[in-house]
Image (cartoon, rainbow, N blue to C red):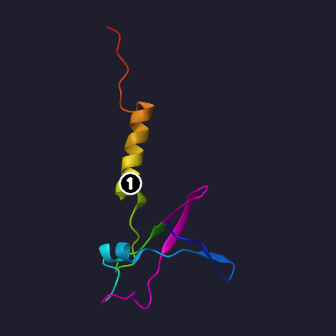
Amino acid sequence: MQKLQNHGGSGVVTLPRDDLEKDDLLEEGALPDEQHLDVDRLGRRTYVVRIPDEGGDLPELAQCEVVERLAAKRALDLGVGRGTPQAD
């Protein structure tokens, strides 16, 4: 678990180095001089951080494995896609 730190009145959290390496975000083992991030608040105490590709495009949340899995689970829980029996 990471620690929320105060930086001029804003909350700052670090991203684990191992995770940055997995996503090929380090240059020769170090952070690039300038790397932009997008932070969205999804709900109470829930945030998502996205890192744009070289072209500046952000990954679509709908195409994220975790979001797809949660959406599928929710659909199953709600019975979406189950047809109602038709009367003869």
List x then y, in percent, for residue 84.
38, 20
Q: Quadrant of residue 9?
A: bottom right
Q: Residue at x 39, y 41 (%)?
A: 73
Given the image, on which type of amino acid does mark 1 rest?
Val
Q: Residue at x 65, y 77 (%)?
A: 10
As rendered, which of 60 and 10 lies closer to the eye?
10
Q: Is residue 79 left or right of residue 7?
A: left
List x then y, in percent, for residue 15.
45, 74
Q: Residue at x 54, y 65 (%)?
A: 40
Figure disc tally: 1
Q: Relative to residue 30, is residue 4 depicted above or below?
A: above
> Which residue sits furthest right?
9
Q: Is residue 18 left or right of residue 37?
A: left
Q: Relative to residue 8, is residue 40 depicted above or below?
A: above
The secondary structure type at the circle numbered 1 is helix
Residue 44 in magenta?
Answer: yes
Residue 22 in magenta?
Answer: no
Stretch of the chain drawn in magenta: 28-48
In which quadrant is the C terminus drawn?
A: top left
List x then y, in percent, for residue 67.
41, 53
List x then y, in percent, for residue 54.
34, 80
Q: Is residue 13 left or right of residue 55?
A: right
As rendered, which of 22 and 50 lies closer to the eye?
22
Query: Label 1, on which residue?
Result: 66
Could you classify mark 1 by the number of other residues whose Cα lies within 10 Å: few (under 14), some (14-19), or many (20 or more)? few
Q: Quadrant of residue 83?
A: top left
